[in-house]
Amino acid sequence: MGTVGATTKSERCSVRGSIDLVNLLLLSGSTRAKSTNAAALASVAASAPPTATTTIYRGLSALPAFNPDDDHDPLPDEVSTLRQLIRAADAVLFCTPEYAGTLPGSFKNLLDWTVGGTEMADKPVAWINVAAPGRGHGAGSTLETVLGYVGAQLIPTACISAPVGRDDVDDDGVIRNVEISRTLAQIWVELRRQ
């Protein structure tokens, strides 16, 4: 697991056929320290096959508020970093909480910064819903709408629900529940199938 991904194979992902995942970008929609969302993404990173690299984006809180007047070169540094990471990724995996029936404002701000660029176009994407059963669907629906708007390539079979409670995450932000970890590791199988 790293914060900057490096390509170790020459073959890149293809939207059609099998994705040869080299670099998976992991984006959490939570600003909370030790969030269940961040823990789920860390679990996915820990279960990465040896040929894959994961990149966990940690700049959500540092992004400036989206302003269309600022969406041009030179971009704010944190926005430029975000877009470079998306561009370099073979696929993007999101995990976001739901607030008031939709995406949290800080995460929607991140997505707003992707609209003006082309980095998400045809990029394979999926998400994890870690909310309790019956919850989180508003955030997922809104995320799907935004990702469709930017032209991302949704991988429905890799969009999973894996409820993670606070008791499932230890003080280091690691999921210690083996069953949940196994469920999250299956995302790699679904991503490679596409």
Image (cartoon, grey):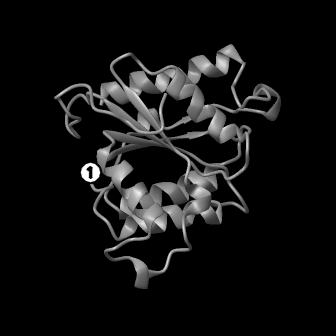
Q: Can you say whether 174 is above or below 143 in the image?
A: above
Q: Can you say whether 170 is above or below 126 in the image?
A: above
Q: Residue 152: x percent and y percent? A: 34, 53
Horizontally, is 86 left or right of 180 in the view?
left
| CA neighbours of label 1 inside 10 A, class few (<14), some (14 to 19), many (20+) | some
Q: Is residue 161 visible?
A: no
Q: Using the image as rendered, state which of residue 21 and residue 102 is in the foreground.
A: 21
Q: Residue 116: x percent and y percent? A: 35, 71
Q: Can you say whether 3 is above or below 123 in the image?
A: above
Considering the image in quadrants, where does the C terminus appear?
top left
At mark 1, the secondary structure is loop
Q: Is residue 39 visible?
A: yes
Residue at numbered disc 1: 122
Report the amino acid beneath label 1.
Asp
Q: Using the image as rendered, state which of residue 30 and residue 150 is in the foreground.
A: 30
Q: Residue 172: x percent and y percent? A: 74, 29
Q: Residue 135: x percent and y percent? A: 70, 46
Asked which quadrant contains residue 161, the reply is top right
Q: Residue at x 38, y 39 (%)?
A: 155
